[in-house]
Image: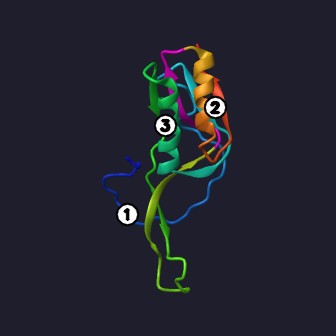
Amino acid sequence: MSILMPKRVKHRKWQKGRSKGNETRGTKVSFGSYGLMSLGSRWISGRQIEAARRSIIRYLKKGGKLWVRIFPDKPVTAKGTETPMGGGKGAVDHYAFAIKPGRVIFELDGLKEEVAREAFGIAADKLPVKTKFIKREV
């Protein structure tokens, strides 16, 4: 099982940050014919991205090409459950991608629209954000 995570990072731990506004980058279908666009803002973990990706691949069997347009590079830390307050920031637990509304998450090409719609519907159930099916603008 391959959980998405960066090979190297400049800073081992990041501050949380705040997610506000809509996405300005990665908002159009660039590679395939169909896309799955985010309608909300959340942190999507590497496990969630991988689960959605695998569900699409399984549904398509061997047809079509899939692009994953997001990569989890934000380290998320966690402390033990019974740990008292203090003692500093916890160790890196997993990596996430902070998504905003308007970002294209996945793209598909080489199949019919109904099949792509169904595949993205299954993948959307694995993601923590509301999503929308979009087509490439001609």
User: Which residue is identified by label 2?
Assistant: 121
Closer to the camera in the image, 20 or 132: 132
Q: Secondary structure at mark 1?
A: loop
Q: Taking 37 as reference, is 97 above or below it? A: below
Sequence-wise first label, 2 or 1: 1
Q: Which mark is residue 53?
A: 3
Does the residue at mark 3 contact the one at mark 1 (Cβ under 8 Å)?
A: no
Does the residue at mark 3 contact the one at mark 2 (Cβ under 8 Å)?
A: no
**Residue lying furthest left:** 8
Viewer-nearest of labels 3 and 1?
A: 3
Q: Which residues are magenta?
A: 101-111
Q: Secondary structure at mark 3?
A: helix
Does the residue at mark 2 contact the one at mark 1 (Cβ under 8 Å)?
A: no
Residue 117 among magenta residues: no
Q: Amino acid at mark 3?
A: Arg
Q: Which mark is residue 11?
A: 1
Distance, label 3 to label 2, CA atoms, is 12 Å
Residue drawn at (47%, 30%) of the image: 57
Residue drawn at (47%, 76%) of the image: 89
Q: Secondary structure at mark 2?
A: helix
91 left or right of 132 in image: left
Distance, label 2 to label 1, CA atoms, is 36 Å
Distance, label 3 to label 1, CA atoms, is 27 Å
Viewer-nearest of labels 2 and 1?
A: 2
Closer to the camera in the image, 115 or 79: 115
10 Å crowding of disc 1: few (<14), some (14-19), many (20+): few
Q: Residue 65: x percent and y percent?
A: 44, 23
Residue drawn at (42%, 21%) of the image: 62
Residue drawn at (54%, 82%) of the image: 82
